[in-house]
Amino acid sequence: MNLQVKEKMDDEKNVTLCIEGEVDVYTAPKLREKLLPLCQEGKTVTVDLSKCVYIDSTGLGVFIGAYKMQRGTDGKLILKGMNSRLLRLFKITGLHEIMKIEESAQEDGQP
Amino acid sequence: MDIYLQKQYERLLASYIRDPREDHLYSAQQLSKWIMEQRIPPEELVNFHISTVKKLLPDLPPQLKHSFDLLIEVMIGYGVAYQETEKLVNRQRELENEIDVAARMQQTLLPENPPPLPGTEIGVISVAANRMSGDYYNFVDHGRHSLGVAISDIIGKGIPAALCMSMIKYAMDRLDDHPLPPSEVLRDLNTVVERNVDPSMFITMVYGVYDSLNHKFRYSTAGHEPGFIYHAKAGRFYELKTKGLVLGVARDVDYPEYTVKLAPGDAIILLSDGVTECKVDGKFMKRSKLKRLIREHLALPAQQAVEAIHQKLLEMTNYELNDDQTILIIKRTRSET
């Protein structure tokens, strides 16, 4: 499956990236290319994952790289709209405790 | 092109022009193997062919002779491409050899057989999906009938993962003389990884200490889904609790410790995500199916059990591992021997 990354400038400071498909070892570079420069510039980046079906460990590495990059700026990284499988991944890896994750309303709370 | 080869070619061409026969073509095929073995570039052969044709057929129309110049010019391009390919093939061979050496070196980073521990059996298997693995395991002697075990999954595969693995191994070796409790091992390793890896790299790990005097297993995890404990009496698997950030993301991370107790016949099953995220027919294998598979083999001695489970997973995935797989089982024996 492929990966689509759509960028939406909400205003000068806020950007939303809509991700559709799978973030894996093959598609991760595409996300990295878009996400990391935005984080480096200190933007508030909201990543909408509601159409993202799968993230593998390389994909997770992109989010970790982005998180580390924005840590040194006054920007923010917000992840939202994860399905329960993705949320589980962020919980197992402990990333949900340090990253800003907005859980979707219909989340069933299953581990 | 050496003289002997030139003579062979000329003779063949002359007799084919005189009397074209099928067996000439067969000879030409044989000759071409020889020409290629001698690394004769294509433009050189075409050039030789043309001069031989001119010699054998001196009355060729001048227009045709001119056209040969064009052919040689075009063939020069092929010649360059041929040389490039030759170089690439050699380079590829060198790289393959280097990877072979690295893969053998990587094997030496893993401990040999698990050390004996009274009243327990330990089995471990770790198989790379490709030649280099991103999975790592280790045993650490904690003295007083206690053994530390670690399973680690390094993000990514191949050479970067292997380099990272050697860092983890040497960071763990530092702790050999004064073994630390699981939470502190992970805290220590986290500092090492955080300082030394690329920002988008990370490592997951479960570290546990098995005390064979009271049969308690105390463990901590760093973003690693550890696996199961099997309670023989209930005949059921329970997930090992887990909480803790992956190694290498933030500084000063605390890792909680958990303890489980094993009765005779109980077992701890530690896995890497290549096992828990194993794909069968394009779909992730259900955990219930994985548990069933493990249970079917738990009666075997621990080493045979891990090997049989791995074999079964291989069969189910049609021998196409998409990730490295590591399985480690610690089983409390039924009778204390």
Image (cartoon, rainbow, N blue to C red):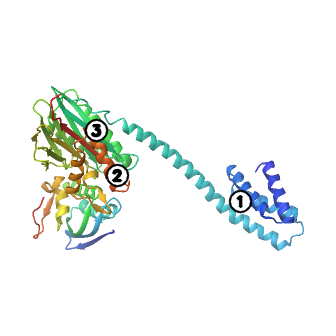
Instruction: Tell me the element at label 2.
Output: helix
Figure check: B108 above or below A64: above
Q: Tell me the kind of residue under disc 2.
A: Leu
Residue that numbered label 2 is attached to? B314
Chain of residue at mark 2: B
Q: CA distance from mark 2 to mark 1?
A: 50 Å
Say which of marks 2 and 1 sits in front.
2
- Answer left or right for B254 relative to A37: left
Q: Residues within 10 Å of mark 3 (few under 14, many from 20)?
A: some
Respond whether the residues carrying marks 3 and 1 are from the same subunit.
yes
Query: Which residue is more in the foreground, B112 or A109?
Result: B112
- Answer left or right for B127 relative to B61: left
Chain of residue at mark 1: B
Q: Earlier in the sequence, mark 3 or mark 1?
A: 1
Q: Residue at x 78, y 51 (%)?
A: B5
Q: Tell me the kind of residue under disc 3.
A: Gln
Q: Earlier in the sequence, mark 2 or mark 1?
A: 1
In the current view of this chain or complex, which residue is farthest to the right?
Answer: B59
Q: Is residue A44 visible?
A: yes
Instruction: Tell me the element at label 1.
Output: helix
Q: Tell me the kind of residue under disc 1.
A: Glu
Residue B36 point in image, percent of width and height: 68, 53
Residue that numbered label 3 is attached to? B303
Mark identifier at residue B43? 1
Mark identifier at residue B258? none
Q: Residues within 10 Å of mark 2 (few under 14, many from 20)?
A: some
Residue B179 point in image, percent of width and height: 18, 30
Respond whether the residues carrying marks 2 and 1 are from the same subunit.
yes
Residue B212 point in image, percent of width and height: 14, 31
Figure check: B236 above or below B78: above
